[in-house]
Amino acid sequence: MKQCMDSDNLHRRLKKIIGQVKAIDRMIDEDIPCEDVLMQINASKSALHKVGKIVLEGHLSHCVKEGIKSGNSDKTIKDFAKAVDYYSRL
């Protein structure tokens, strides 16, 4: 999996998201207005979506490409469709 993505970039993004989620938890305890909490939830959700996009792009550019090159295109396409399905679920 490390071959198909920039793991340092992903770890950096995930640490930021973890910090955002912890901040949301604190906001709830501090009785911050709902609108502000929702804004931070949306920011975290968007950041996590971007992480998924990066993973999916890495999967496409490395794993799918290699699977097709190796002559295993049917299984590769089926697996990629499954990955897209997982990613696109809300």
Image (cartoon, rainbow, N blue to C red):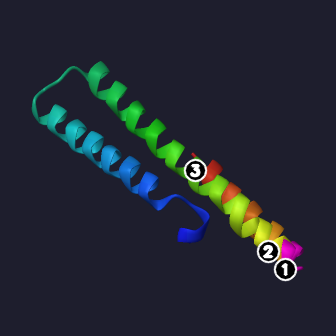
12 or 19: which is nearer to us?
12
Q: Mark 3 points at which residue?
A: 54
| Residue 54 visible in this rendered orientation of the protein | yes
| SS at badge 2 | helix
**Does residue 6 belong to the magenta stretch?**
no
Say which mark, if any, is on residue 70. Answer: 1
Q: Do the residues labelled 2 and 3 touch (CB within 8 Å)?
A: no
Q: In this view, does 66 lie to the left or right of 74?
A: left
Three-letter code for the amino acid on which mark 1 is drawn:
Ser
> Residue 88, percent across and down?
64, 48
Three-letter code for the amino acid on which mark 3 is drawn:
Ile
Say which mark, if any, is on residue 67. Answer: 2
Q: Which of marks 2 and 3 is nearer the N terminus?
A: 3
Which image quadrant for residue 31? top left
| SS at badge 3 | helix
Q: In this view, does 46 lie to the left or right of 71?
A: left
Q: Are marks 1 and 2 in contact (CB under 8 Å)?
A: yes
Instruction: Tally the marks.
Output: 3
Q: Which of marks 1 and 3 is nearer the N terminus?
A: 3
Q: Is residue 86 left or right of residue 14?
A: right
Which image quadrant for residue 29? top left
- Mark 1 burial class by Cα count in 10 Å: few <14, some 14-19, many 20+: few
| SS at badge 1 | loop
The residue located at (52%, 44%) in the rendering is 49
The residue located at (25%, 44%) in the rendering is 19
Q: What stretch is highlighted in magenta?
A: 69-74
Real-space Cα separation, disc 1 to disc 2, in angstroms: 5 Å
Image height check: is 28 above or below 48? above
- Mark 2 burial class by Cα count in 10 Å: few <14, some 14-19, many 20+: some
Q: Do the residues labelled 1 and 3 touch (CB within 8 Å)?
A: no
Which image quadrant for residue 28? top left
> Residue 74, percent across and down?
88, 74
